[in-house]
Every structure is written in structure tokens, then in C-alpha cells.
Amino acid sequence: MPNQNTSAPRQICEQRRRFLKWLAASPLAVVPMTSFSAPYLVEGQSAADVASRLFDQMITSPDQALSLFDFERVASMNLPPAHFGYLASATDDGNMRTVNRAAFDKFDLRMTRLHGQGRPDLSVELFGEQFDAPFFICPVSSLRAFHPEGELAMARAARATNIPMSISTFSSTGIEQVNQAYRQPVWFQLYLQSQFEASTELVQRAEQSGSKVLLFTVDSPARSTSSVGALYERLDTRDCTACHNDFIGQRWHKPMVAPLSSNGMPEQTGPFLDWSIIDRLRNITDMKIVVKGIETQADAEAARSVGVDAVYVSNHGGRVMHSGRAALNCLPEVVAGAGQLPVLIDSGFRRGSDVFKALALGATAVGFGRPFIWGMAAFGQEGAEKAVDMVMRELRTSMIHAGAGKVQDIHAGMLS
């Protein structure tokens, strides 16, 4: 794809500013040249010489990445503006992404020493299956917009690292093919259709493919406008309708929804839905029902009362509504309302230490959307695998310093 977007991501620019500010105040800036210091600078460049270019360097392979944000920079160069804009967009000029990230800074990890716990075990059981880490790949629509192999590349990366994989109702590959790439059934995310018969077809197709987990999204009864995404689209001179028309709100050519019948009368959905919809879904499937988009204790209690199998904290990565409230800040009260139910969470996770903080606050597992897509958009399956490995390594490091030998040992007392 053409390299049309040359703007550096906000995080990299901020890192560069902080580094240069530090360098300006550093003793390196005032040390006089002596016979002791000069030999280091005789051949080659000093740190000051290269500092201005330090954060402008583009990685050329997954192994060069030092953080997930390295993949974002490459993805921004690889993708057309409209496609990258879809990833970058959030409500209130992108501020909800900032809100989600800022929440993690409110919690510090308490580092303790000489635990003797050995190499931490990251493995967990989720919905009756064993996985190698307590995080999963979120359902994101249209992954072929970010790499030609899309969901297939991501599924192979998830299989190689043994973490859960989920796909969207508006995936660009059918669930059967994704299952083949993953070598076992993936989780299926449901956007309720205007005709319940069509939703039934979707759910039963997923179940017949072997899927055991249904992620029912309830956080999008209405949407705020994303000016960031719209601005990126304006920069894209291509005719996007030649290959897709996602960005004008029509997705009916997607392989999961294209075959749906149009029988039955349209129903009132979105803001007209209430908790009785869970009973209707329960009547058409034996899949585990996870209600996605819960942000309050009251809703967690309501979900538990109607018999869901898990609750999922999410503000859709800040893409739906400018509430000003980070997903992580919602987690403690949702955990309180969920009782013994598993609690999943996504929105804003970028590091293994972020995962640790969510687990300490009561989450069962954490979802990653954008970061793993950055890896795939940058280097395909290899990039996605490397991104997953980085989060595993960072989580393991956090557990070593906190004294957690296994995921189940992580608790709120490890935060301050």
C-alpha cells in the first residue's frame, strides 16, 4: 500500500521532546572537553549529535522493536491515510484515547524483593480452555484493511503464541477460514442486526463452526463523531469504494453478513434494547454469552441477574462516546458487581505492566486491539507475534518484581 502518511505518532513525538529536555539539562551538555572525555568523541558522533534523530529512526524488522509504539510508526507509513485513521480515531478529537491511557498512570506497582518464586507462569484458563497468557486479541472489524491476510495472519499469530482470538461481525474473512488458521474455534463478537432472524443466523453459523464464546457488544446504541478519523479520510485521495465501503457505514458485503436473509420485520435496536435481549440470545445458542461494553456496577449486577457467563469492561477504545471516563477506572466497580463472574477488559492497553494493573484490580483477562494490529500492519504475522511476545515479556517482568509466581497470585496489594 502507498506510504502516504508521514506524520509521526503523538507518543513518539512526546518521547522525543522529553528526551531532548532531559539532555539539555544533563551534565553531558556542560562537561568540558578534556583528555579523558575527548577520546570517546574522536571517531563517530556524540549522544548530543544523534539525539535529534534518535526517535525518528524507523525499525525495519520486528526484532528491532523496543515497544509496541515502534510498530505504530511503521504502520502509519505502510497504511493509506483512511485506514490508519480508523485505528487512530477516537471521540473528542482523539482525547478519549488519552483518557484511557492516563488512567494507568494513577496506579504504581509495588516492587518487593527476594521472593524466590522462580519464572512466572502466565497461563490461565478461560471458558474451559488453557492459554499461555491472560490477554487476548480483541474483535476488530475489517482486518484486511491493515494487511492483505487480515484475520488469517492474526489468527496464525494467536495460534503461535497460544492466546485467545476473537473476530468481529464485520470481519473481512469468514469464521470458518479463521478457525482453520487458528486451528480451533475463535470467539465470535456479535453486533445485533435490525432483524433478529439475521442475528440468529449469525450466532448459529458461529456456533456451528465450533465457536464456544459469544461476545455480545452493547456499548454502541449511539455514536459520537470522530473528527480525527474524518480528517485522515480527507487526506486519502483513493476511491475507497473500489475495494470496500466501510467508511460510509455500509458493510453488507462482509462475509459474515453478506449471506444473511432479509426475512422478518425490522426491530427496534440500539437505544430501544433492554436486558431481555439476553434471554432471546440464550434461547438460540448454547455458547457462553459475554456482554461487552459494561462500565458500571449496576450494569454488571444486571448482567449477572440475567445469567450471562462473563462481563466485559470496554468503552470501545474511546471510539463511541466521550464519557471522559477511562475503562480502567470502571474496572473496580464492575468487578464488585460481577460477583464470581469472569471480568474481561479492553481499551487503552499498551504494555505488560498495564495488564498487570488490570489483573491486580480484579480482571480475569485483558484485550488488545490496536497494538497487535500495528504489529500486523507493520510486518504481517511476524509483527503480530512479536507484539504479543513483547507484552508477555513485560508482564513477566512486572510479576517478577512484584513477587507473583503465577497470574492467580496478582492482587490489589501489589499496587499503590
Image (spheres, rainbow, N blue to C red):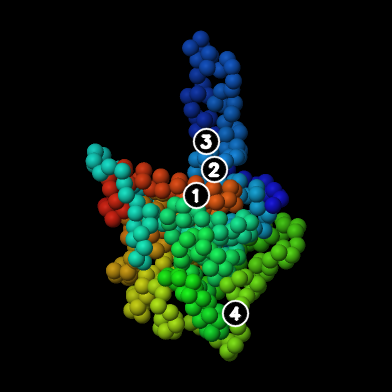
Mark 2 or 3, nearer chain start: 3
Kind of residue at disc 1: Glu
Q: Secondary structure at mark 2?
A: helix
Residue hosting label 3? 19
Image quarter of residue 236: bottom right
Horizontal arrangement in the rendering, residue 337 relative to residue 143 (left or right): left
Kind of residue at disc 4: Leu
Horizontal arrangement in the rendering, residue 415 relative to residue 39 (left or right): left
Q: Secondary structure at mark 3?
A: helix
Position in image of residue 84 (x %, y %):
63, 55
Kind of residue at disc 3: Phe
Residue hosting label 1? 385
Residue hosting label 4? 260
Task: Tell me the CA gap for discs 2 and 3.
Answer: 24 Å
Task: Tell me the CA gap for discs 1 and 4.
Answer: 34 Å
Residue hosting label 2? 62
Q: Residue 194, relative to residue 336: is it above or below?
A: below
Position in image of residue 221 (x %, y %):
52, 75
- On residue 322, the disc is none
Write the residue at 35% across / 48% down: 108
- The reply to whether dot 1 and dot 4 touch (C-beta < 8 Å) is no
Mark 4 or 3, nearer chain start: 3
Position in image of residue 210 (x %, y %):
45, 71
Q: Secondary structure at mark 1?
A: helix
**In the depicted view, which residue is nearer to us: 254 or 141?**
254
Task: Tell me the CA gap for discs 3 and 1.
Answer: 29 Å
Q: Residue 82, relative to residue 303: is it above or below?
A: above
Between disc 4 and disc 3, the foreground one is 4
Q: Can residue 13 be spotted in the picture? A: yes
Write the residue at 38% across / 57% down: 131
Q: Secondary structure at mark 4?
A: loop
Mark 1 or 4, nearer chain start: 4
